[in-house]
């Protein structure tokens, strides 16, 4: 929304793209690790306290939702001019983390996890990768089109 658009518009692009590999590592890999840990913890904890009416889709959805961290407070403390490396990594990780969580949630919701097999994990991975790359390409195209329109105004 507008706040994210403004933050993206104001970020120092050179610093952002210089650290893009770190941003992707923290944003994608970190979110997937959080998703796995939170989903596993939800299964173990919620079953232990007697909440048994949830199915695997629900536990994985909880993992996808709670793996989305919010770095707004951290960005308010950091100064982009004083700590450009840290600011660009935290800002970029927050954006990539949110996108990864949304893609994970949609991938989990699109699968039928009632019959688990080894193909289920591959289907989840395939759906995640498909959604991730198509969303990325679509985002790049819309971003380029928006930049072109703004430049021509």
Image (cartoon, rainbow, N blue to C red):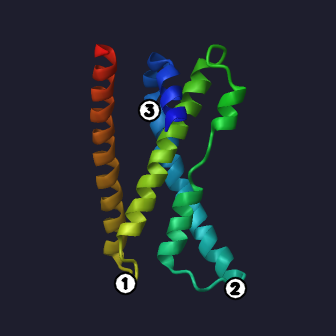
Residue that label 3 marks: 21
- Percent x, y for residue 7? 53, 27
From the viewer's perspective, is the residue at label 1 or at label 3 nearer?
1
Distance from Cα at disc 1 to Cα at disc 2: 23 Å
Q: Secondary structure at mark 2?
A: loop
Where is residue 105? Give x, y as percent: 45, 60
Dot 2 alpha-carbon crowd within 10 angstroms: few under 14, some 14 to 19, many 20 or more: few
From the top left corner, tell me how far across and down residue 116 is, in percent.
39, 80
| Residue projecting furthest to the front | 153
Q: Which mark is residue 50?
A: 2
Name the mark on residue 68. Answer: none
- Where is the C terminus found, in terms of image quarters? top left
**Labels 1 and 2: the sequence-earlier one:** 2
* Residue lying at 66% horizontally and 77% vertically, measured from the top left: 46
For the residues labelled 1 and 2, say whether their Cβ atoms are less than 8 Å apart: no
- Relative to 30, is 18 above or below? above
Front residue of this view, candidates 115 and 119? 115
Closer to the chain start, of discs 1 and 3, is: 3
Q: How far apart are the alpha carbons under marks 1 and 3?
A: 37 Å
User: Which tag, 2 or 3, sits closer to the chain's start?
Assistant: 3
**The residue tagged with tag 1: helix, strand or loop?**
loop
**Do the residues bearing badges 1 and 3 touch, measured as CB atoms within 8 Å?**
no
Q: Residue at x 45, y 46 (%)?
A: 99
> Measured along the vertical axis of the image, is residue 114 above or below residue 24?
below
Q: Circle 1 sits on which residue?
A: 115
Residue at 49% x, 54% y is 32
Q: Residue at x 53, y 47 (%)?
A: 30
- Displayed quadrant of residue 18: top left
- Nearer the observer: mark 2 or 3; the answer is 2
**Observer-nearest of 22 and 87:** 87
């Amino acid at each position: 929304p507008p706040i994210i658009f403004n933050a993206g518009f104001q970020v120092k692009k050179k610093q952002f793209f210089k650290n893009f590999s770190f941003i992707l590592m923290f944003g994608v890999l970190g979110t997937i690790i959080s998703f796995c840990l939170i989903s596993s913890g939800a299964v173990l904890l919620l079953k232990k306290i007697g909440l048994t009416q949830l199915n695997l889709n629900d536990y994985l959805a909880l993992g996808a939702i709670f793996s989305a961290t919010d770095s707004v407070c951290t960005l308010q403390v950091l100064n982009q001019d004083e700590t450009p490396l840290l600011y660009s990594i935290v800002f970029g990780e927050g954006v990539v983390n949110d996108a990864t969580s949304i893609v994970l949630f949609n991938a989990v919701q699109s699968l039928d996890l009632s019959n688990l097999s080894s193909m289920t994990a591959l289907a989840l991975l395939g759906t995640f990768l498909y959604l991730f790359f198509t969303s990325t390409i679509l985002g790049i195209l819309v971003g380029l089109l928006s930049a072109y329109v703004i430049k021509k105004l």
